[in-house]
Image (tube, rainbow, N blue to C red):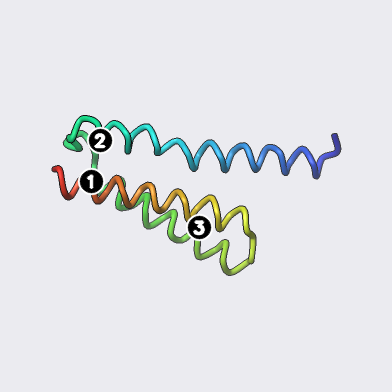
Amino acid sequence: MDTVALSAVIGSAAALITTLCWLPQAFKIVRERNASSISAPAYGALAFGVALWLVYGLMIGEVPVIAANAVTLLLVLVILGLKVRLG
């Protein structure tokens, strides 16, 4: 496998893992109806950083960056919303 193909595989794997890693936290909060252990400031900062990555992806027109960060932002905002709703 050449370097370009390998970098695409590594980048795709990294994007998939870091995008989906928020699902277990969201499921746990919904299942337990408790978000007290979640840090709102940390998740707020994370949401802001991911939003900036999304804007960057839009500016450079890179679909993988856009897709990964759009999904991540959605999941992080769901977790933040659950934090506000459930405490």
Q: In the image, residue 16 lies at what x, y percent?
A: 56, 40
Q: In the image, residue 55 lies at what x, y percent?
A: 50, 65
Q: Secondary structure at mark 3?
A: helix
Return the residue found at the far bottom: 59
**CA separation in Å, label 1 and label 2:** 7 Å
Q: Within the image, what quadrant is residue 36 found in? A: top left
Labels 1 & 2 near each other (Cβ < 8 A): yes
| Nearest to N terminus: mark 1 or mark 3 | 3
Q: Secondary structure at mark 1?
A: helix
Return the residue found at the far front: 31
Image side of residue 80 versus residue 59, left or right: left
Q: Which mark is residue 29?
A: 2
Q: Amino acid at mark 2?
A: Ile
Image side of residue 24 versus residue 53, left or right: left
Q: Within the image, what quadrant is residue 62 found in? A: bottom right
**CA separation in Å, label 1 and label 3:** 23 Å
Q: In the image, residue 30 lies at what x, y percent?
A: 25, 36
Return the residue found at the far left: 87
Q: Which residue is mark 1?
A: 82
Nearest the viewer among 51 and 31 is 31
Labels 2 & 3 near each other (Cβ < 8 A): no
- The residue shown at (85%, 34%) is 1
Packing grade of label 1 (10 A; few <14, some 14-19, many >=20) is some
Q: Amino acid at mark 3?
A: Trp
From this view, report whether residue 60 is shown above or below residue 4.
below
Q: Which residue is mark 3?
A: 53
State the quadrant of the C terminus: top left
